[in-house]
Amino acid sequence: MDWLNRIKLILAVLLAAGGVVAYYILVDYSDLLRVLTVVAAVVASLAVALWSEPGQAAWSFIRAADREVRKVVWPTRRETIQTTMIVVVMVVIVGFVLWLIDMGLVAALSKLTS
């Protein structure tokens, strides 16, 4: 990474940090103004970061990941509900089995200790 990109990334970090510092310095102002200051600093920071080579690479990765997510065949509502119900039933069954094992261990230990 060349020096210009390093300067851009350092500037981006300083902008974001400046927004956080401004939030704590502006205690006498309304919360809305303080939050808007942080939001503006973060937006400016992201803009500067995207202007750098690593920022461009990250943005192209995000776009490629979004394209891949759109290619996924997501389950239908019916399939999702059926799968959820299977999971709920299995959780109840496993919970009941664990409760039975626990009761058996408690009974065995109480016989051993009495």
Image (spheres, helix red, strand yellow):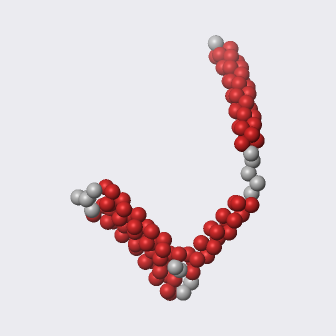
Q: Can residue 85 be seen in this view?
A: yes
Residue at point 61%, 76% (across, down): 57
Residue farthest along the front direction in this orientation: 77
Q: In which quarter of the image is residue 54?
A: bottom right
Residue found at x 45% / y 68%: 43
> Is residue 78 toward the left or the right of residue 31 in the image?
right
Location of residue 66 (image quadrant):
bottom right
Image x and y of residue 55, in percent: 56, 75
* Image spot of residue 9 (x, y percent): 48, 77
Q: In this view, does 15 lie above or below 29?
A: below
Determine the residue positioned at 68% across, 69% down: 64
Q: In this view, does 49 lie above or below 31?
A: below
Give the percent coordinates (x, y) of residue 33.
31, 60
Q: Quadrant of residue 100?
A: top right
Percent position of residue 13, x then y: 44, 72
Quadrant, the N terminus:
bottom right
